[in-house]
Amino acid sequence: MRHHILLATILAAASPAAAQTAVGVSVGASVPTVAGLGTGVHVAGSIERSVMEALSIRADVGFAWLSDAGGPHTAVRPLNANVDIAYKLQRGGWFPYVTGGIGFYRYSATFRSAVLLDPKLRADLIALGLDPTSASIKENESGVGANIGGGIEVAMTARIAVVGDVRYHRVGSFGVVAPYNGSFVSASAGFKRYF
């Protein structure tokens, strides 16, 4: 019984809730919500500011490397910059949370060289002013999207927390020549440092 009280006291002292600002990094996976694009690595960084004890505003930037499983692209690379609101609950040293927000999404895609032999695609590329005989062709497009999700923070010390986060990113279609839906789910784990 005394060990449980001691552990609860240590976790309460380790609670990062009193801290106001935090920076974090995470690594995980991005899973596209449509067929044709393959799962890839997702890397993100964030800065967060508490506005109330359970409410904070977070700005984050993420980058992913998605494979195009059998599609016209060698790779699709989404970059996102979001502003989110997070609502946290405290359960000892555990902080489950829900989050959501809006952001800017930029997709960069490179076409496979074999696809450039397709007569229709070649005609589309020429109509766009691109050279279908080049070694590779990149296409970039940007748009606005939204995300919603949740996760958990586990306080390791008064200033350090381990974080697990899952989010659904709702984004429209990208690509002029070979369109694809840009929505994806990201699942990541990382660390957060409070100041």
Image (cartoon, grey):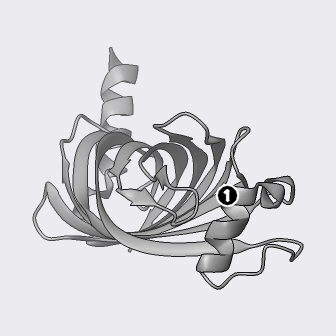
**Count of marks placed on residues:** 1
**Relative height, residue 114 to residue 98 (above, below):** below
In the rendered image, residue 114, in percent from the top left (x then y), is placed at: 86, 54
Residue 22 in view in this figure: no
**Relative height, residue 28 to residue 54 (above, below):** above
In the rendered image, residue 127, in percent from the top left (x then y), is placed at: 60, 78
- Which element type, helix, strand or loop, lies under badge 1? helix
Query: Which quarter shows the N terminus?
Result: top left
Q: Residue furthest left?
A: 52
In the rendered image, residue 81, in percent from the top left (x then y), is placed at: 41, 72
Q: Which residue is mark 1?
A: 120
Q: Is residue 38 left or right of residue 59?
A: right
Q: Residue furthest bottom?
A: 129
Q: Residues within 10 Å of mark 1 (few under 14, many from 20)?
A: few
Q: Nearer the viewer, residue 53 or 137?
A: 137
Q: Nearer the viewer, residue 85 or 136?
A: 136
Q: Which residue is at 86% across, 74% downward?
A: 133
Q: Which residue is at 59% across, 46% downward?
A: 28
> Tag 1: residue type?
Lys
**Relative height, residue 98 to residue 107 (above, below):** above
Q: Is residue 85 left or right of residue 132?
A: left
Q: Quadrant location of residue 94?
A: top left
Q: Which residue is at 35% across, 56% downward?
A: 172
